[in-house]
């Protein structure tokens, strides 16, 4: 059977594969490039573009090499511990956690009654010791006057006693002379009596004359006894005068201890003054203790970690709360040791704070004397032989410029990213 061929439908074309553009020969590309670059406008545009790229690259390089930054940084500050300086019972609590207080604001009130009693007692002791000291001071000149007068009187008594001895000795000498005279008269009278006895026996004199001789002899003997008694009395007066002199000299020696007595009196006065000073110090301590019953804020800051409650008994040194001084905060940035090559104290710093999204100005205040690893609780020991060099980080303290933290929105512990402009 014969095959027949159907005619093609009108407006139909045979399918043709897609034709890829034929690449130009190298010589033609070079010719087109030369024609393009030979155009002054194109050439100028290329030159300007190259210059812009070089300048932009230079400034970018200069910018990225003009600072050192790190994200290992945070805000630090002082955590001021508030503790009790006296023990006692808490009767009032005047602040709460996270409350901002200014310096001098009362925080806690301890029961002041016991300390008021101690203050009253100290005032009484001080008043008594002050009066005693004043009396001792007045006694110093009085003692000086009295002892001086006693010395003068004792000196006069000594002189009087010496004069009395002289008088007594004169009287004794007179008595001895009278005794001698009486004894001589008695000897004569006794001899006359013997002679008269012989004469009366011979009846050469009258009995009357003999009786008179006997009376004269008796009177002479009596006169001798009287003179002897007078001499003994005069001698006793001399002895008494000598005793009075010894007593007066002893009194004079006692009165001559004026310097020693004055030293003792002054020492007592000084002791009284020292005692008064002691009680004065105790009074001042009692006043301080009474003031310490009201615990006040030493600085302006935010109260945190309050651990005291009303009714609690606190002891000396017990921590009651903490105060964070928001006016004295700084940034501690832990830079790699390779970043410190051109970092210097005083360089400007831009501080980006994550919490506020703002930038603050500051400056480098100091660079730590050791790395964080060395100052850690357990510093690394590289004595095992398995040493691996690790880039260390050095803490750098950055302080804010004046007025940057006046809004009190920054808190210790916040994450920051400082940029230290090293040129």
Image (tube, rainbow, N blue to C red):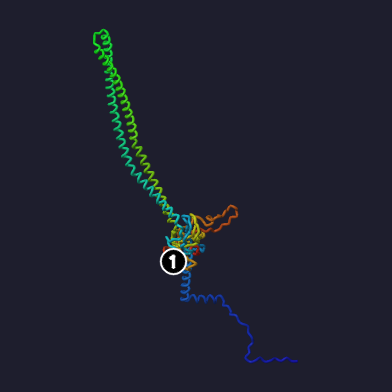
Q: Position of residue 228 (x, y in %)?
A: 30, 20
Say which residue label 1 marks.
407
Q: Position of residue 265 (x, y in %)?
A: 36, 41
Nearer to us in this view, 268 or 5: 268
Nearer to us in this view, 70 or 225: 225
Q: Position of residue 208 (x, y in %)?
A: 24, 13
For the C terminus, which image quadrant? bottom left
Q: Is residue 304 visible?
A: yes
Nearer to us in this view, 144 or 62: 144
Q: Residue furthest top?
A: 202
Q: Position of residue 195 (x, y in %)?
A: 27, 10
The mark tally for this picture is 1
Q: Which quadrant of the view contains residue 168?
A: top left
Residue at position x 30%, y 35% in the image: 153
User: From the viewer's perspective, is 27 left or right of 217?
Assistant: right
For the N terminus, which image quadrant? bottom right
Nearer to us in this view, 143 or 43: 143
């Amino acid at each position: 059977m014969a095959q027949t061929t159907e005619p093609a439908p009108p407006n139909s074309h045979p399918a043709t594969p897609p034709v890829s553009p034929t690449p130009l020969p190298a010589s033609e590309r070079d010719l087109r490039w030369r024609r393009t670059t030979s155009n002054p406008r194109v050439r100028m545009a290329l030159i300007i573009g190259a210059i812009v790229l070089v300048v932009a690259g230079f400034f970018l390089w200069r910018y990225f090499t003009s600072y050192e930054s790190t994200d290992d940084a945070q805000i630090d500050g002082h955590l001021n511990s508030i503790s009790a300086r006296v023990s006692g019972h808490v009767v009032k609590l005047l602040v709460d956690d996270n409350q901002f207080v200014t310096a001098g604001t009362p925080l806690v009130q301890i029961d002041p009654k016991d300390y008021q009693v101690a203050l009253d007692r100290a005032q009484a002791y001080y008043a008594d010791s002050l009066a005693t000291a004043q009396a001792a001071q007045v006694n110093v000149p009085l003692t000086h006057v009295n002892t001086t007068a006693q010395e003068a009187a004792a000196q006069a008594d000594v002189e009087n006693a010496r004069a009395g001895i002289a008088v007594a000795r004169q009287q004794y000498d007179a008595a001895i002379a009278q005794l001698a005279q009486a004894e001589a008269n008695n000897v004569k009278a006794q001899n006359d009596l013997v002679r008269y006895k012989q004469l009366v026996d011979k009846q050469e004199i009258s009995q009357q004359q003999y009786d008179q001789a006997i009376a004269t002899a008796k009177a002479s003997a009596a006169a001798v006894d009287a003179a002897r008694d007078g001499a003994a009395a005069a001698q006793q007066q001399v002895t008494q005068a000598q005793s009075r002199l010894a007593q007066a000299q002893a009194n004079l020696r006692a009165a001559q201890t004026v310097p020693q007595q004055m030293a003792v009196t002054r020492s007592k006065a000084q002791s009284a003054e020292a005692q008064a000073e002691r009680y004065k110090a105790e009074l001042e301590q009692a006043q301080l203790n009474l003031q310490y019953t009201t615990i006040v804020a030493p600085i302006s800051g935010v109260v945190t970690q309050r651990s005291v409650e009303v009714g609690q008994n606190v002891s000396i040194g017990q921590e009651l709360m903490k105060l964070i001084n928001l006016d004295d905060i700084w940034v501690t940035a832990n830079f790699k040791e390779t970043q410190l090559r051109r970092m210097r104290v005083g360089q400007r710093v831009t501080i980006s704070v994550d919490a506020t999204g703002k930038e603050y100005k500051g400056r480098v205040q100091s660079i730590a004397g050791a790395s964080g690893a060395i100052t850690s609780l357990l510093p690394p020991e590289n004595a095992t032989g398995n040493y691996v060099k690790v880039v260390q980080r050095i803490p750098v303290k950055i302080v804010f410029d004046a007025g940057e933290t006046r809004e009190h929105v920054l808190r210790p512990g916040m994450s920051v990213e400082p940029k230290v402009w090293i040129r």
